[in-house]
Amino acid sequence: MKTRGFALAAVLLPFLATSLLAQIPPPRPAPTIPTGPREPRAQAPDPANLQNCQDFSNQPLITLTLSPTEINAQDAITATWDVRDRRVGVPGAPGVQWAYPVHIEASSAQPAFADPAPRASSHTFRSPATGGHVTVRTRCGEKRVDWERMPTLASVSPARGPVGTHVTLRGSLFGGTKGASRVEIVRGNTATAMATPIWGDDSIEAVVPNIAAGLATIRVVKGGLRTTLARDFRVIKTLTVDSALTGLAVASLGLAPAFIHIHHGENASSLTLSGAITGAGPLALPFTVPDFDKRVPLGARILQNLALPIGIAETVRYRFTNVNSNSLSGSVANGRLVLTIGFEGRGREMKGELRFCYGAGPLCVVPRWEDDLAPDINISNARVTLSLAPGLSAGALTFPSAEDTFEADVQVGSDFENWLLPPLRAYAQDTKVMIRDRIHSRLNTAQVRNAIAAAVMAGLRAADPSFHQVLAVTPSGASIVVEYE
């Protein structure tokens, strides 16, 4: 019996097992993990598990900056970097420092970067190259930043000039060809492109465009993007003071018949400057011209007449009479303003008189001065010349110095007696010298020079209403070149 029971169980057990197993569901397949970036994990895996560098979460977070951003020839370059593990920390936040070695490469860096480099640090270096790069490289990632030297504008020559001036720019790294580069002149807030007939890597020729006068700057824009430091340039205007412009100045002086008046009276002489030349009212300046008195030798014939009147000739005298300026002209010679003041010549500048006593002995009447018995002396072609050297003061044209001359032709007739002629000629010459000295001391003064300079400045403003101030004065032959804005 027992044998049969065991045999039955052996038959039933496989049957029951197959039925029960058929009722158990099959196992589910493992979920498919999508490829591509993942969110940062909460914890870093063992470094041995870092296998797939294509996995975004396995790539380090690298920051790299270079300073300055625009590198000039004299600048040192500072590279600053930080390498972090993006897998550690809350989502979106940087992780801890990278656990693997960091290598930094830089072209022509002096001094070179340490290798391996710190995971976060900075390093300052110089390079003779005109451009290069810095690369931070590590397992599963790298970052590169390129740098390039800025073009350098060292000088601009000339530093001033009018519209149309050709300016030479010298520097480096302008580029062998112009391409998209340009030269700009900046006046106020407006940048204007300059024509560049010549373009080289270290020298450019540019032309000042038609812009307003005043202080500006010039710069080079390389490739349309990178801009050099700017250099100052002053846009100016020029006027040429020549004989035509001095005519305006002369007219503004307001020449009057007695612009300069020389008078010799009974006891004193005077030189009067009109208000036009003084800038104020007329100015009378006394000086002394001595009378010429000479006794007539006994028996000498009367000067004016061949026949001797009945009477006694006692003394002959000559006196200087009134002389007025009657012309004024201006010109430019040897870079100087030349004003020529002419005087009237009417043949009576030196008047002769004879003290004569008519009759003889007791019959002699009271002596009196007779004008018609002594011939007059002519002083003709009298002129004063002021030659004024130009200068500059406080933005205005000035005449800080001047040279003056007085010339005149003294005509002493041949009908004078020998006893009178030599001393009379000497007296006439002395009188001319005295007048010259008085004119020099009274006319060649700062007051008069300033009045003339103001007249010329008025002429400049009349020629160009935009005239503001004088920047430079350059004497040049038959003209004076005035630079202004």
Image: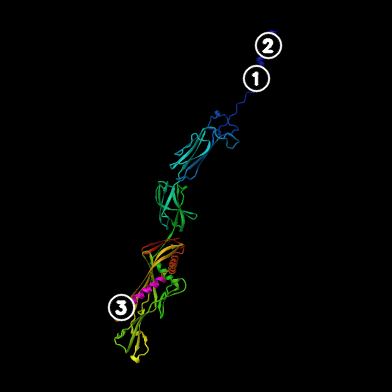
Tell me: residue 163, above or below residue 73. below
Asked whether 363 or 32 is in front, the reply is: 363
Sequence-wise first label, 2 or 3: 2
Residue drawn at (30%, 79%) of the image: 421
Magenta stretch: includes residue 436: yes
Q: Nearer the viewer, residue 421 or 394?
A: 421
Give the magenta part as a residue range.
Answer: 419-441
Q: Which amino acid type corresponds to the residue marked 1 in the rendered image?
A: Leu
Q: Amino acid at mark 2?
A: Leu
| Nearer mark to the viewer, of 2 and 3 | 3
Q: Residues within 10 Å of mark 2 (few under 14, many from 20)?
A: few
* Label 3 SS: helix
Tell me the CA gap for discs 2 and 1. Answer: 21 Å
Residue 185 rendering spot, x and y as whole percentages? 45, 53
Residue 368: image location, x then y, percent: 37, 86
Residue 21 is labelled as 1
